[in-house]
Amino acid sequence: VRNDAALELANRHDEYNKSIVSGLSSETDFDDEPNVELFKRRNPKPFRPSNSRGDALLAGIGFNVHVQSLALNILQPDQSAIPAAICHSVTHGAPADHARGFGIQGNDGSRTVEYVAEANAARGGLRRLEAKRADIARELETYISSLVNSVGEYFKSRAQTAAVMQQAGLRPTRHVAPNISSISFYRSKTTECAQRLQALSWEIAVRRGNCFSQALGIAVTSYLTSISDGGPGWIGYANTWLRHGYLITFEGLLSAVGKELGMIEDASVAVEMLRMVHVVLVPDDCVYGAVNKNESSRRRIPVPHSPYVRWVHLAHLSKKGSESKSMYRLEIGLNQSYYQSRVPEPLKGGAAVRFFPVLYQMGVDIRQWGVNAGRNVTSQIKERNKVGGVPSAELGDNSDAATEASSDFNGCGLIDDGDDDDEGGVADNEILMTLNVEGFRKMNAYAHAVIPTTAGVTAATSPIAAFYPSEHAQLQPLPPHPILSSLSEAIKTSAGKMEHGVLDKSATACQRMGGGSTVFCKSGKDRTAMQVTFKQAQFLQRLMDKKPSTTLEDSQISYDDVFEHATLMRIHGTRVPICEKNAGEAKYAFNPLQAKFMPEMLKPPPITLAGFLKKPET
C-alpha cells in the first residue's frame, strides 16, 4: 500500500478544498501590499504564474492561462462602433507534470542505487514512460514463462527419481528446493520486474492525472471562449459540435530535446485524453446527468471568483463492455441569466459536446535548430570559443548569427527562463513529425465529416469522425481534404527543419472549421507571445484585405504588413505585461542569439529582449 503517496493526494485534496471554500489561495493577502513585487502578488487569486510550475501541490492546475482576444470594430461618422470581427486564442504553459520532473521515474524508494543508475531506467514524459512500461510488461511476461517452464522441468526430473527414492525408503519432497539455480534466477527476476512495473504504473497513473487535469481546464477555457459573443458557437457551429465534437487545436512551440522533450511527451498524452470528455452546460439550478440531485450537489466544485461559472462537476461514466474506453461527463453550472441569454440554443437542455483535440508541435528556437543539426547547441558554441570558429557549413544560414552573438555568450546559459539544464539531455528527431502526422490524420477525418466532399452529404448527415487509431484501422484511408492540402505539404517538408507553416496552416484550418485554438510553450509567455501576436496580426490583415468573393481564411495578404502589426502588438500589447506578471520583468526571455535563430514571423523586437543578464525568475 502506498501510504505516503495516498497521504500526499489526500493533503492536496484538502488544500484545494480549503482554498476553494475560503476563496483564497493563501492565508496571506497581498492585494493591499504595494511593496510586493508584481509577480509575487496573489491577485487575481485564481491565477497560477509560470514560476510555480515546480510546485507539486499545484501540479493538476494549468498555469499562466490567458484568453487572448482581438476585437475589431468599424467606427461610424458619429464615433459609434459596429462590431466587425473577433478572434480568440487561449495561451498557457505546457500541460506537463513539471513538479515530478523528466528524469528517472518509477522509483518507489525501495530500489537499489544500481537500479536508479541503470542505463535503461524509465525516463522522460508520458509517451516515453508508457512505451517503457509496455517493454517492462513484456519482459515480465517472458520471465514468468521462463519461471513456469523451469518449475515444470524440475518436477519432471523429480518424477523420474521418485520411484527410486521410494524404493530406498526416502520420502519424496513436495516443495521446490531453494538451491535450484534456474528457478531462483527467474523467481528473482520476476519479483524485481513486477516491482518495477508496479512502481512505474503508479508513476504513470499520477502523472496522467496531473497532466489531464491541466489539459481539461485549458480545453474548457477554450470551449467557453468559443460560445462568448462573436465566437463560432454563435455563427452556426454549435450543431456541428453536437454531432462531431468541438475541435480544439493545441499549437506547441516546444523543442524536442531535454526537459522540453518530456513536456511534449506529457502534453501529447494529456491532449489525447481529452477525447474522453463530454461537456454539458447547465443553469445553476438544474442537474441533467445526476441520478440524485443532492448527491450531485455534494460533489460540485464551486468556482468562487467567476461572475458566470458557479460550479463544475466531473463524473466518471461506467464502462459499457470490457473494450470500452473510460469516459467523463463534465457539467458546468452557469449563472441562470447568463445561461438563458448567452448560451446558443443547440447547447441547452443537457446537450453534451465531446472534445475533438488535435496537437501540432514545432520547435521554433535555437534548441530545435540544434536538434535538427544533430548536435547540442551549447557544445557548438563552446567548441567555437575553443577552436576559433564553427564551420559555416554546419551552422548553415545562421552562421553569421551565431558568430555575432557568441561574442556576448560568455558562458551564459542559452535558456533564459530559469532552467539551467534545458539545453542538454536526450533529443528526438522523429517525434515532431510523428505527432504532426497523427494530428493531421485526426484533423483530416474531422474535416471530411464537417465539410463533406461527397455530393449530397452535409455535416448533419456525414459519418462521425474517427479519432482513435483502432477506429481508423477499420476504415478506408481518407485522402487529404482540400482545405488541408497546404497543411499536408507543410508537414511533408518539415522533417529536419523548423517549419512554422505547420502551426500557421493548422490554426487557419481550425478557424475555418469553427474550432478553438490554444498556443503554448514551456512557460506560456515568450514563444507563446510571438505566436499569438502573429495570429492576431494575420487575422487583422486578412480582414482588412478580404475581398467580397473570398473567405477570410483565403484572403491574400502581405506578410510584411503582418509582421509590422505583430511587432506593434509585441511592444505595446498585453504580452509584455504578462511577462512582468509572471517573472517580474517587462521583457521577453530571449537573448540576441536566440532571437536570430527563430522563424522570421516570430522574431521579437530588439527593444523587448531581456538579454543575457536578467533576473533569475525570467
Image (cartoon, helix red, strand yellow):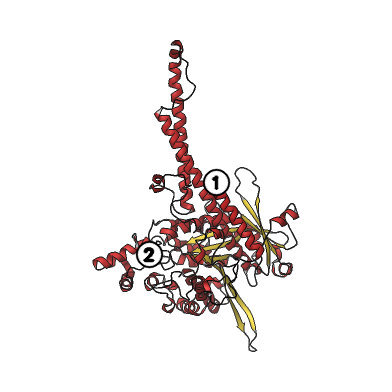
Residue farthest along the top direction in this orientation = 167
Q: Secondary structure at mark 2?
A: helix
Question: 18 or 436, which lies in front?
Answer: 18
Residue holding disc 1: 2
Amino acid under disc 2: Trp
Nearer mark to the viewer, of 2 and 1: 1
Q: Could you say which disc has been placed on residue 547 in the image? A: none
Q: Is residue 171 left or right of residue 462?
A: left
Q: How many marks?
A: 2
Q: CA distance from mark 2 to mark 1?
A: 43 Å
Percent from the top left, x then y, of residue 32? 60, 75
Percent from the top left, x then y, of residue 73? 61, 80
Question: 258 or 282, which lies in front?
Answer: 258
Q: Secondary structure at mark 1?
A: loop
Q: Could you say which disc has been placed on residue 369 in the image? A: 2
Q: Is residue 475 visible?
A: no
